[in-house]
Image (tube, grey):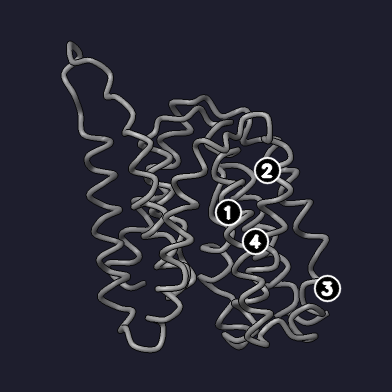
Amino acid sequence: MTAEHVAIAVLVFAAAFTQGSIGFGFGLVVMAALPTMLPLQVAVPFTAVYGACVAAIIFWRYRRHASAREMLPMLIGSVAGLPLGILALRDLDPEPCIRALGVFLIAFVLQAAWPRRTAAPEREAVARRWGVPAGFAAGLFSGAFAMGGPPVIAYATARRFSPATFKGVLQGYFMITTAILVGMLAYAGLLTSTVLEHNLHFAPMVPLGIWIGTRYGDRIPPVLFRRFVLGALLLLGLKYVVGL
């Protein structure tokens, strides 16, 4: 096993651990470094296959907390946005779009974390109908840039779900949309034997990372969990804006 193989194994484990503990982040962690080790045409389907598997495994754990009613608006939006994002992939310059997403995430975190007077009532959850535009934006970014998670993560955070519901709803959404993406990649001829060989080679890292992540993630108190999610969104926003 080469040093590159060890690095990929650690990366897959870290990504599975992250998604298992806070409910998202597999693709973002993997794609932050994997394109430096594998060609992009291999890295994207490699991540998509694992992403669908990771979401399905975690969804099964939190299936009792999932709600089709909560997932449906996001799925409706994504079904509309995903093909438009794929069509735009050839024509759009990704930099301004990604930086716009970063500005949105930073603004959302600042608004959600803005200190309130103690006498003020608890901020209410946003209406479910906002899941449609959040899903649409996620579909656009998934189709065009393979990074559709942040809009629906921000929406789910604004819905003020419990940690278990947050994970159940998002994993159900990710499971369905990533499976659609894998199908599209297979249809495009990008899901090659080379990709699947890489997936099989590093497969043991996925359940191990998920098991440890969910084991410790379930112990995080709801208030602290929300802070972790907002902190992760802020870091993502800064990354997208600065272009690190």
Question: Looking at the figure, which quarter contains the N terminus?
Answer: bottom right
Instruction: Give the residue at x 61% y 36%.
Output: 217
Q: Is residue 203 left or right of residue 87?
A: right
Tell me which amino acid carries mark 2. Answer: Phe
Tell me, yes or no, whether the two marked residues, 1 and 2, touch with CB atoms within 8 Å. yes
State the image quarter where residue 98 is shown.
bottom left
Tell me, yes or no, whether the two marked residues, 1 and 4, touch with CB atoms within 8 Å. yes
Disc 3 target residue: 201
Disc 4 target residue: 51
Q: Is residue 214 above or below residue 144?
A: above
Q: Is residue 125 above or below residue 3?
A: above
Q: Can you tell which of label 3 and label 1 is closer to the viewer?
A: 1
Disc 1 target residue: 174
Q: CA distance from mark 3 to mark 4?
A: 16 Å
Q: Is residue 84 above or below residue 28?
A: below
Question: Looking at the figure, which quarter contains the C terminus?
Answer: bottom left
Q: Who comes first in sequence, dot 2 or dot 4?
A: 4
Numbered marks: total:
4
Name the secondary structure under disc 4.
helix
Q: CA distance from mark 1 to mark 4?
A: 8 Å
Q: Can you tell which of label 1 and label 4 is closer to the viewer?
A: 1
Q: Can you tell which of label 2 and label 3 is closer to the viewer?
A: 2
Tell me which amino acid carries mark 4. Answer: Gly
As drawn, the label of residue 59 is: 2
Tell me which amino acid carries mark 3. Answer: His
